[in-house]
Amino acid sequence: MLIEFDHRESNSPYVERIWRSRSRLGGPFLSMADSNIELVFTRLPGFVAATLRGPVSQASFVDCPPDGEWLAIRFRVGTYLPAYPTAALADHRNAQLPVLPGGRFWLSGQAWEIPRFDNAEDFVRGLALAGVVARSDAASAALDGEPLRASRRSLERHFHQVTGMTLGGHRQIQRARSAASLLMGGTPLLDATFDAGYFDQPHLTRSLKRLVGMTPARLVRERPQLSFSYKTDTL
């Protein structure tokens, strides 16, 4: 395997989960569409980077360097950084944050210590207290299907402003990632189609080609190295 992944869920209201990975060899991997913001710390021989990643609306192949280590804070959908509009970060327009001596980096006018896998929630709590991260209750309510206090159009505009994508686009990405996880886990094609919420196999095929990067048949046959993925509820 090109990249080894490890992750844990988070009980933070701002964080969905923390993940880390390590590469043994260099090579291409398939980066799926994603609807979350992530703060990623990269360590390569002689190099450290801090990157704020936005949502990605289409899959692509990405080159992975050898001997790399990554730690990422995956924010919940609805969490945002007021100083970094989410739409401006979308589709690989990432913000590269200055890395300082002594294991620190610069974010929103302050120097912060690079977190560890086991203390990332404490780090995010500090960001929230400083107003660096915030959470939209309306966006979260839209995801959970709670009763609306505003019009559907107003909610859609707000959701797009906070997350950088439409509510429908987010659900399409989650559905495609869920289907890919089912297929890679050995679920038969027909079962994966309906378990993930698709009308039929052509619908599944079109979605996976755009959002995962391969047809269902190729995923099952080639079993490519995918970007970080995990089982998720279908929306």
Image (spheres, rainbow, N blue to C red):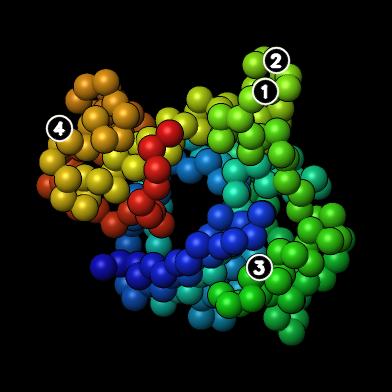
Lateral position of residue 143 relative to residue 193, left or right: right
Which residue is identified by label 3? 121
Q: Position of residue 156 (x, y in %)?
A: 64, 22
Q: Looking at the picture, which amino acid does disc 4 mark? A: Leu
Q: Nearer the viewer, residue 39 or 75?
A: 75
Q: Nearer the viewer, residue 69 or 165?
A: 165
CA distance separating discs 1 and 3: 30 Å
Say which label, 2 or 4, has the lower sequence index.
2
Q: Residue at x 29, y 40 (%)?
A: 179
- Closer to the observer: label 2 or label 1? 1
Say which label, 3 or 4, has the lower sequence index.
3
- Closer to the observer: label 1 or label 4? 1
Q: Looking at the picture, which amino acid does disc 2 mark? A: Ser
Say which label, 1 or 3, has the lower sequence index.
3
Q: Position of residue 20 (x, y in %)?
A: 48, 69
Q: Secondary structure at mark 3?
A: helix
Say which label, 2 or 3, has the lower sequence index.
3
Which residue is identified by label 1? 148
| Numbered tag placed on residue 151 in the rendering | 2
Q: Secondary structure at mark 4?
A: helix
Q: Position of residue 63 (x, y in %)?
A: 39, 57
Q: Looking at the picture, which amino acid does disc 1 mark? A: Leu
CA distance separating discs 2 and 4: 37 Å
CA distance separating discs 2 and 1: 7 Å
Quadrant (top left/top right/bottom left/bottom right) for the N terminus: bottom left
| Numbered tag placed on residue 190 in the rendering | 4
CB-based contact (under 8 Å), mark 2 and mark 1: yes
Q: Position of residue 202 (x, y in %)?
A: 22, 22
CA distance separating discs 1 and 4: 35 Å
Q: Is residue 175 above or below residue 226?
A: above
Q: Secondary structure at mark 1?
A: loop
CA distance separating discs 2 and 3: 34 Å
